[in-house]
Amino acid sequence: MIGRRDGFRSYGNENWEFDQNGPMRLRFAFVNDRPTKQWERKYHWPRSIREHQREKTRNDKSMVL
């Protein structure tokens, strides 16, 4: 079971093709997602405002569903 602060690590291969003017015209991506625990994370950014709002809504006992 994945906890609230756990996540996924994505790894794989990407191939890009660009047209003559510079923009990408074709992209192939073969990506696998592996569940990870919080302690396995390489980078730890501060939580976003959206995450704080979601948690506050989840914990609001007065909210009627």
Image: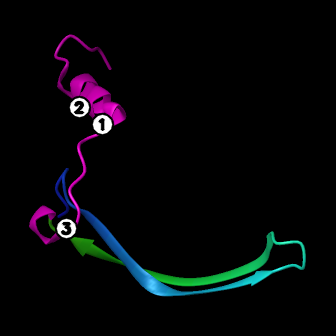
Q: Does the magenta stretch include residue 41?
A: yes
State yes or no: discs 3 and 1 in contact (Cβ < 8 Å). no
Residue drawn at x 20%, y 60% is 6
Q: Residue tagged by mark 1?
A: 51
Crowding at dot 1, Cα within 10 Å, few <14 / some 14-19 / many 20+, comes out as few
Quarter of the image that includes the N terminus: bottom left
Q: What stretch is highlighted in magenta?
A: 38-65
Image coordinates of residue 44 in percent, x first then y, are 20, 56
Q: Which element type, helix, strand or loop, lies under badge 2?
A: helix
Up the image or down, 52 lies above or below 21; here it is above
Tell me the CA gap for discs 3 and 1: 18 Å
Residue drawn at x 23%, y 31% is 55
Q: Which mark is residue 55?
A: 2
Q: Does the magenta stretch include residue 62?
A: yes
Q: Residue tagged by mark 3?
A: 41
State yes or no: discs 1 and 2 in contact (Cβ < 8 Å). yes
Image quadrant where residue 29 sits: bottom right
Q: Which element type, helix, strand or loop, lies under badge 3?
A: loop
Q: Disc 3 residue type? A: Arg
Q: Disc 1 residue type? A: Glu
Up the image or down, 61 lies above or below 29; here it is above
Pick whichever, 31 or 49, lies toward us: 49
Q: Upstream in the sequence, badge 3 or badge 2? A: 3
